[in-house]
Amino acid sequence: MYYGKYLLSIFVISFCTAYTSFAQSNCSPNCGVPASVIEAYPTPNVYPLQINEQILYDRDYWTIVEGLVIYDAPNGNITENLGTGYNYLTVIEESGGWAKIADNKWVKSETLGEPTLPSRFTGVQLPDEPLPYTMAWTLRHLRGAKTPGADAAPDNPYLYRYTRVSIYSTVVVDGYNWYQIGENQWVHQFDVAKILPTEKPEDVDTEKWISVDLYEQVVIAYENDTPVFATLVSSGLPQWSTNEGVFHVYLRFPRTLMSGAYNQPDFYYLEEVPWTMYFDNDIALHGTYWHDGFGYRQSHGCVNLSIMDAYWLYNWAEDEFDFANEDFEGPAVYVFSSGDYD
């Protein structure tokens, strides 16, 4: 689902270049930084996470096309009749028209839909020094315009969704930001999600902490004041918005069942949600195998990450816990919004 957005303010932070605003009539065809600047820094100096095939594909995930009825054995007794909904299962084995989803849990194979391939999107590890230009991901397939406010240029490079770009310059046209991402390449602010590190809030009391920018739909992991990792996420839809504030990870599971809204139109049953870290009651950061919509709000309030990103964050956060002393309070999670949705 797509929601437009606009910035109410520009945050002055170390990762950002100075903000420059032009009226449309004052922006010449040659506005923005020259080609020599772009040639000297053509791509963001970041390190994308590498795909670990064993981690990403260690389960088979299936949709359910009919009502979710669970039996204790093939041709056995019904133990749960959960009806229709947004249902995904992990299949361990199939035998004689039956699919095993867990110990003593079976479903009829005929109720399985198509297998689901998890997203291969990954976030990026950040260098020790601040980036010279703000980094962003494209949120859709596109070609940039030649000038701010213009239509896409058919001879500009075709950029796939999730392409990493640098924002070299910013121009305001009709109240919206247009970003220069290459020579004669400009995109509307709705078409990208930016990495905007924030200052460490006073309430954050852990060395490692996580920010969730609900406007940009970007998570950043920090070690003290230094951002070390950033990625796209999907937070809660308006009717199930993710709460703002400072929280702490208090419970985590490498795999867990998530289910809710029983007997309601938005009922969901999601088996073995990977690399889950709860921080606000039943709201968690977790891996997501059922969609590839990162950068847009999608969830019932949780912060959805790709499986590889959730795996990295889960392991990175571990040494913030002191399990030996029964300290189960983990990294602080700062949820905020750098702007308002349009």
Image: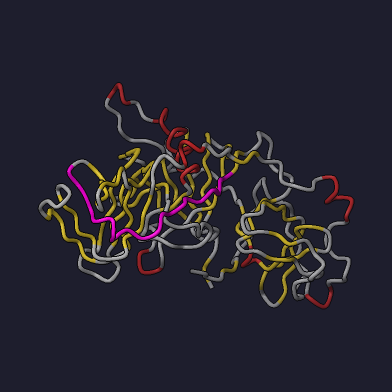
**Colour approach in the figure:** secondary structure
Q: Quadrant of residue 163?
A: bottom right
184 or 213, nearer to the observer: 184
Tell me how many marks there are: 0
Where in the figure is residue 182, as x and y percent of width and height? 79, 57
Q: Residue at x 15, y 56 (%)?
A: 80
In the displayed orientation, state which residue is furthest to the top: 324
Residue 270 located left or right of residue 23: left
Q: Residue at x 57, y 45 (%)?
A: 123
Q: Is residue 109 magenta?
A: yes
183 or 60, nearer to the observer: 60
Residue 32 located left or right of residue 83: right
Task: Examine the rendered structure and indicate whether residue 305 appears above or below residue 20.
Answer: above
Residue 148 located left or right of residue 56: right
Residue 157 located left or right of residue 90: right
- Which quadrant of the rendered structure holds the C terminus? bottom right
Q: Residue at x 30, y 21 (%)?
A: 324
Task: Examine the rendered structure and indicate whether residue 111 appears above or below residue 335.
Answer: below
Q: Which residues are magenta?
A: 104-123
Q: Residue at x 67, y 45 (%)?
A: 14
Task: Examine the rendered structure and indicate whether residue 248 appears above or below residue 75.
Answer: above
Where in the figure is residue 252, as x and y percent of width and height? 33, 39
287 or 319, nearer to the observer: 287
In the displayed orientation, state which residue is furthest to the front: 96
Q: Is residue 132 magenta?
A: no
Where in the figure is residue 285, as x and y percent of width and height? 40, 47
In the displayed orientation, state which residue is furthest to the left: 77
Task: Examine the rendered structure and indicate whether residue 119 appears above or below residue 57.
Answer: below
Where in the figure is residue 196, as x and y percent of width and height? 60, 51
